[in-house]
Amino acid sequence: MDILEWFGRTLIIVGVLIVVLGALLYFGGKILGIGRLPGDILIQRGNFTLYFPLATAILLSIILTLVLNLFFRR
């Protein structure tokens, strides 16, 4: 397999993972409660709302790290 075939395959895999992650975030917030974890920061003051999903980002990072290690480990 030459470098362009490998790069193309890698881009497709990354694209599929991004689509799956996007769908999980879009539908997961309604179904699984993702985005309302303890550790997520929500500040509401008048017309200003700041939402910083710290715990959700850490959890997704750990899950993605484990999944990608399973696929790309030799």
Image (tube, rainbow, N blue to C red):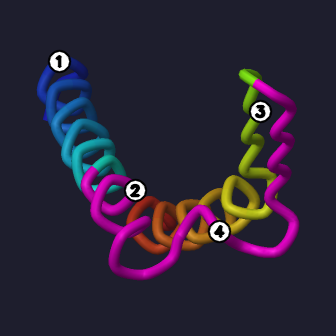
**Image location (x, y in percent) of residue 70:** 46, 74
Say which element carries label 1. helix
Q: Kindly report the distance in space between the C-alpha atoms of the residues bearing marks 3 and 4.
A: 14 Å
Foreground label between 2 and 4: 4
Q: Is residue 69 left or right of residue 45?
A: left
Foreground label between 1 and 4: 4
Tell me if mark 4 has few (under 14), some (14-19) or many (20+) residues whose alpha carbon lies within 10 angstroms of its own: some
Picture mark count: 4
Q: Considering depth in this image, is 74 or 32 the residue closer to the camera?
A: 32
Tell me if mark 3 has few (under 14), some (14-19) or many (20+) residues whose alpha carbon lies within 10 angstroms of its own: few
Q: Kindly report the distance in space between the C-alpha atoms of the residues bearing marks 2 and 3.
A: 18 Å
**Image location (x, y in percent) of residue 50:** 77, 32
**Could you tell me which residue is drawn at 32 percent across and 53 percent down?**
26
Foreground label between 3 and 1: 3
Q: Which residues are magenta?
A: 23-46
Q: Amino acid at mark 4?
A: Arg
Foreground label between 2 and 3: 3
Find out whether residue 50 is within the magenta segment. Answer: no
**Could you tell me which residue is drawn at 81 percent across and 48 percent down?**
42
Say which element carries label 3. strand
Q: Which mark is residue 36?
A: 4
